[in-house]
Image: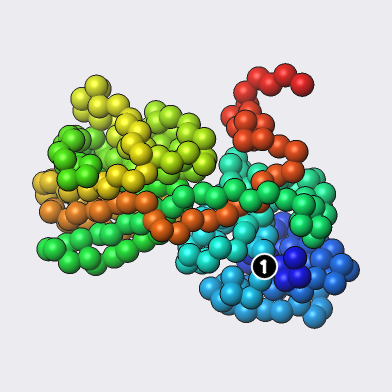
Amino acid sequence: MKRIGVITKPNNPEAIKVCNEVARWLKERSIEIYVDSAVSLDVENIKCCSASELPEHVDLIIVLGGDGTILYTARLLNGKKTPILGVNLGGLGFLTAVKRDELYSALEKVIKDEFEVEERMMLSVNLCRNGKIISNYSVLNDVVVKGTLARLISLETRINEEYVNTYRADGLIVATPTGSTAYSLSAGGPILYPTIHSITLAPICPFNLTNRPVVIPDWMNIKVIIRGKQCKPFLTVDGQVDQPLEDGDVIDIKRSESSIYLLKCPGKSYFDILGERLLWERKN
């Protein structure tokens, strides 16, 4: 690794402090460092560019923050296969698997090219209105359709054009395996191993209690059609982008041709990370 980028929130003092420390550490090892021009650092002779341009210049991106910062970075990559090392400075951190006290031992492995990369599938989402695509998104975690008030909405759902159900619920979550430990988990969805090839549909507080989460293979196409004008819902992707919906709108969801690539935490399995984050009882 000769060129490494660092992405963090510019308004987080703790993250900026760690970013400075990381930049100095990398500079001492003759690694070219790129940071978002919105982030002000004390380290001299680093290269600054816009966050959207950063993936074009580097061999690896270090993300300092929480899972939300990883989701933001995934959108910046826009299909580029630059691997990401996530360092947890936030809350749970399923995607930011490396803890702060593990950072430099992980970086030692990185600069020696002694690391494993894990591919994570993404979803491609088209929002169609009156037969035309009006918005398109790449999604790492989940696609959520939910009402703006505490009222039921009706969501006609089709898989590979076959009618499945019209959910009367507070909403519906369509999640990747990576997103199975996010909102979907809170809605009663299953935890999926992150490299499994599947998609989860989890209704949010359904009127009919027999409407349970469903897991389908990732080659299937999902269509969710808004039915009724009683409560205008929103489409939310990765918890970060909102789009108001209208009666008759169609949300077309399928596996994206792009993936993102996360560096695995040295010495930790996925179940180690689950156990830490979900406070499972673990044996030594």
Give the position of the N terminus as an image quadrant. bottom right
Q: Is residue 229 left or right of residue 283?
A: left
Three-letter amino acid code of the residue under disc 1: Asp
Nearer the observer, 100 or 176 = 176
Q: Which residue is drawn at 62% across and 31% down?
A: 271
In the rendering, at what x and y percent does residue 14 appear? 72, 57
Q: In this view, does 244 lie to the left or right of 283?
A: left
- Residue 171 point in image, percent of width and height: 28, 40
Give percent across and percent down for residue 30. 85, 72
> What count of labels does the image hold?
1
Question: Is the C terminus in the top left, top right, bottom left or bottom right quadrant?
Answer: top right
Q: Is residue 170 left or right of residue 267?
A: left
Q: Coloured how? A: rainbow
Pinpoint residue 172: horizontal percent, then vertical percent.
29, 40
Circle 1 packing at 10 Å, graded few (<14), some (14-19), many (20+), is: some
| Figure check: 107 above or below 269 | below
Q: In which quarter of the image is residue 164?
A: top left
Dot 1: what SS? Answer: loop
Query: Mark 1 = which residue?
Result: 59
Instruction: Identify the residue at the far right of this view.
Output: 28
Please give the name of the residue rendered at 32% of the width and 63% of the height, measured from the top-left corner: 136
Is residue 183 at all visible to an observer of this figure?
Answer: no
* Residue 169 appears in view: yes
